[in-house]
Amino acid sequence: MPIVSAVCPSCGAQLDVDNGKDAGICKYCGNAFITENAINNYNIKYEVKADTVIMNNRASMEELLEREEVYSRLNEIKKLTDLYEEMIKLYPKRYEGWWGKILLLTGRFNDLEADISQANTWFGFVRDSAPADALPDLEKQYNGYLLKRSQCQLAELNNKHSEKVTKLEQKIKSEKSGARYYAVKWRGLFIALILFLAASAFIVIKSRQLIKDNWNVDSDEVNNLAWVGLAAIPILSILSIVFLVLFFKNQEFYAIGACKRDAKKAEKELSDEESSYKAECDRLTREINELQSKMNT
């Protein structure tokens, strides 16, 4: 059976069909077609003049728009992407290709988190090439999407800011409370140590007096014993301090300074967060006001 060229009536794609079959299925869009109609569609693209056949392979914008409708119904994203690129290549002064790229990028204005860094440039081409009667509706759709996107970003910014401020304030309060706790604890330990030293000195002095008054002991020996007792006090104190440092080294000895440093760090983070939030909030607010103004005009 002869294989001839044809064009799908649904999507406009060029096909090779079996001339002996009455019908077929397009391998691009999946729609069924009558073979005779598909061949006729292909022949329409030829102009016959004085026995000379001139092939015209350039698809018209109407044909491209028909393909767009078919691909959109089938949700063929890859084919739509290629189709819009073809529109821009063949008809760069028409807005349909640029507008289609914007629709794809934004999920037909439903994706509020899409990266639209290129969309403003594309819409500039739409604004320059769209007909005067179509441009207001296009601007309304695009600005409406930008407005909804900015409002969503502002609401999300407020939520994140509130959560972060709450966490930082709780951290500051916790660190300051920890610093006070450890300060009181160590102050109590040092007071106890001082009381221990005073009690030890009192005991040594009192013992010296008792020994001198009640036992027949030479005064020099009493003094020697007293000096030994007094010398033992600082030695015991140093050993006590060393013991405390070693015991609390990894837990509490440096805890006061660590808590204060962490509290200051959290306070700085809170200050930076407030500054950053204010700047971003002001930017989004200005953007929302400008878009609302455009929508109302």
Image (cartoon, grey):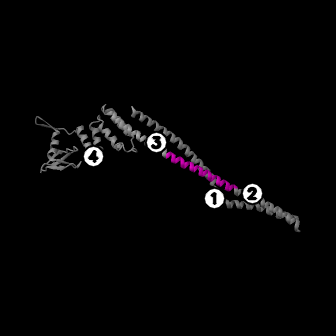
Residue at 25% of width from left, 40% of height from top?
Answer: 65
Q: Is residue 273 left or right of residue 204?
A: left
Q: Which residue is mark 2?
A: 194
Using the image as rendered, state which of residue 271 and residue 110 is in the foreground: 110
Residue 136: say if magenta: no
Which of the two labelled residues, at mark 2 and mark 3, occupies the earlier sequence position?
A: 3
Q: Report the Cα–Cα distance between label 2 and label 3.
A: 59 Å
Q: Secondary structure at mark 4?
A: helix
Image height of 134 relative to 25, above or below: above
The image position of residue 25, as x and y in percent, is: 19, 50
Q: Which residue is mark 1?
A: 249
Q: Residue furthest front?
A: 296
Q: Report the Cα–Cα distance between label 1 and label 4.
A: 71 Å
Residue at 49% of width from left, 40% of height from top?
Answer: 281
The magenta segment: 160-187
Q: Amino acid at mark 1?
A: Lys
Q: Is residue 258 left or right of residue 216?
A: left
The answer to the question of whether label 1 and label 3 lie on touching residues, with beta carbons closer than 8 A, is no
Q: Which residue is mark 4?
A: 73
Looking at the rendering, in which quadrant would you find the C terminus?
top left
- Mark 2 or 3: the one toward you: 3
Q: Is residue 73 left or right of residue 177?
A: left
Residue 154 bears which disc, if any? 3
The image position of residue 219, as x and y in percent, is: 88, 64
Q: Amino acid at mark 4?
A: Arg
Residue at 63% of width from left, 57% of height from top?
Answer: 252
Q: Amino acid at mark 3?
A: Leu
The answer to the question of whether label 2 and label 3 lie on touching residues, with beta carbons closer than 8 A, is no
Q: Amino acid at mark 2?
A: Ile
Q: Residues within 10 Å of mark 1 (few under 14, many from 20)?
A: few
Which of the two labelled residues, at mark 1 and mark 4, occupies the earlier sequence position?
A: 4
